[in-house]
Amino acid sequence: MDRLLELQEAFNEPGDPIDFGCSLDRQDEIIMLCEELNQNKSICVVSNWTWWDIKSINVDNSDKEPITLVKADKILFDELDRFPVFGWVRTSPLVATHFKCVFETKNTFYILIGPGTRKNIAMDNASAFF
């Protein structure tokens, strides 16, 4: 039962507030800025998001950047229709950030709308649902 509680907390409990994300009224502007950065990369707009810093207990990552993902509980727009509107998504790892609201992965710009939170998640918890 402890494992289920641990997974529930990892997946549903909010983290600490983070100074990242933009207002919905900037969505079109940020989409255009992302297209200027790389017009071949898809765009997904999300809200109700949490920035996950992944902790690995088996590997010494002291000299490496942490793996970072975003879990968003509400998809507002997905350019490629990979995810249903109002569905949820967990991103692939962070490649870069832009404009204090864009989380870039290998294939996608995620525009983070509204306030979000940040928390540490164990690797096995982050991958348990996927």
Image (cartoon, rainbow, N blue to C red):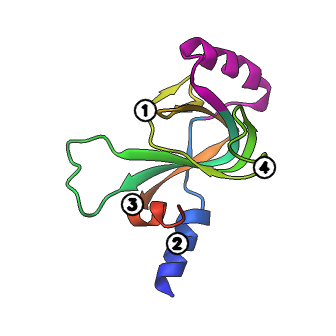
Label 4 neighbour load within 10 Å: few <14, some 14-19, many 20+: some
Query: Judging from the image, what secondary structure is the residue with disc 1 in?
Result: loop
The residue where tag 4 is placed is 86
Q: Which mark is residue 77?
A: none
> Residue drawn at (63%, 47%), measured in percent from left and top?
49
Q: Quadrant of residue 77?
A: top right
Real-space CA distance between mark 4 and mark 3, rounded to the nearest whole angstrom: 26 Å
Q: Residue 110 location, x and y as percent?
A: 60, 34
| Residue 119 x/y as whole percent | 48, 54
Res. 95 mark = 1
How far apart in space, not on screen, are marks 2 and 1 (Cα)? 26 Å
Mark closer to the chain start, 4 or 3: 4
Amino acid type, mark 3: Met
Looking at numbered disc 4 in the image, what kind of residue is underneath it? Answer: Phe
Q: Residues within 10 Å of mark 1 (few under 14, many from 20)?
A: some
Query: In the drawing, what numbered circle is on residue 7?
Result: 2
Residues under labels 2 and 3: Cα distance?
A: 11 Å
Residue 26: image x %, image y %?
74, 23
Residue 35 lies in the magenta stretch: yes
Query: Which amino acid type corresponds to the residue marked 2 in the rendered image?
Result: Leu
> Mark 1 or 4 closer to N-term?
4
Coordinates of residue 76 in the picture (x, y in percent): 76, 40
Distance (Cα) linking label 1 and label 4: 25 Å
Q: Which residues are magenta?
A: 21-43
Decide if residue 127 is on the left or right side of residue 110: left
